[in-house]
Image (cartoon, helix red, strand yellow):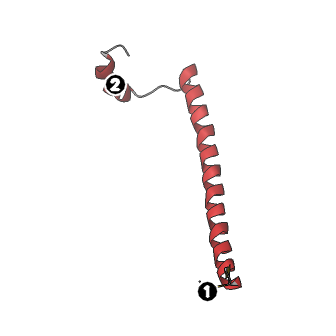
Amino acid sequence: MNVKNGLTTVRAQCAIAHVLRTVDRKIEAEDRRKAALQVLFQALLRDLMTGRRRLPPEFVAQFESIVGGAL
């Protein structure tokens, strides 16, 4: 990066702007992914709590030893 009188060159500024735009797009994509996963989680949780969806017995069994068979 060429610095003259405390200012960066236009070329360097463009490169920095490009990197920042790329990072912004990545953050936006991750925000959309997070929102989609939150919706999915809420739907699955609702299904579990209402009994519309059941956990497989072998999955539940791995926790029975932890809670003393109370499941």
Locate the C terminus by quadrant: top left
Amino acid type at image mark 1 = Asn
Report the residue at 44% width, 27% height from top.
55
- The mark total stands at 2
Report the residue at 61% width, 86% height from top.
2
**Residue 17 to residue 48: above or below:** below
Report the residue at 67% width, 67% height from top.
21
**Residue 43 to residue 36: above or below:** above
Distance from the alpha carbon under mark 2 to that under mark 1: 61 Å
Report the residue at 68% width, 73% height from top.
17
Residue named by callout 2: 63
The image quadrant of residue 67 is: top left
User: Crowdedness of circle 2 by 10 Å Cα count: few (<14), some, many (20+)?
Assistant: few
The image quadrant of residue 11 is: bottom right
SS at mark 2 in the image: helix
Q: Position of residue 9 (x, y in %)?
A: 68, 84
Residue situated in front as seen by the camera: 23 or 13 = 13
Q: Which mark is residue 43?
A: none
Residue situated in front as seen by the camera: 25 or 69 = 25
Q: Which mark is residue 2?
A: 1
Which of pointers 2 and 1 indicates the residue nearer the eye? 1
SS at mark 1 in the image: loop
Among the two numbered marks 2 and 1 on one chain, the one whose residue lies closer to the N terminus: 1
Q: Position of residue 20 (x, y in %)?
A: 65, 67
Residue at the far top in the pictured view: 70
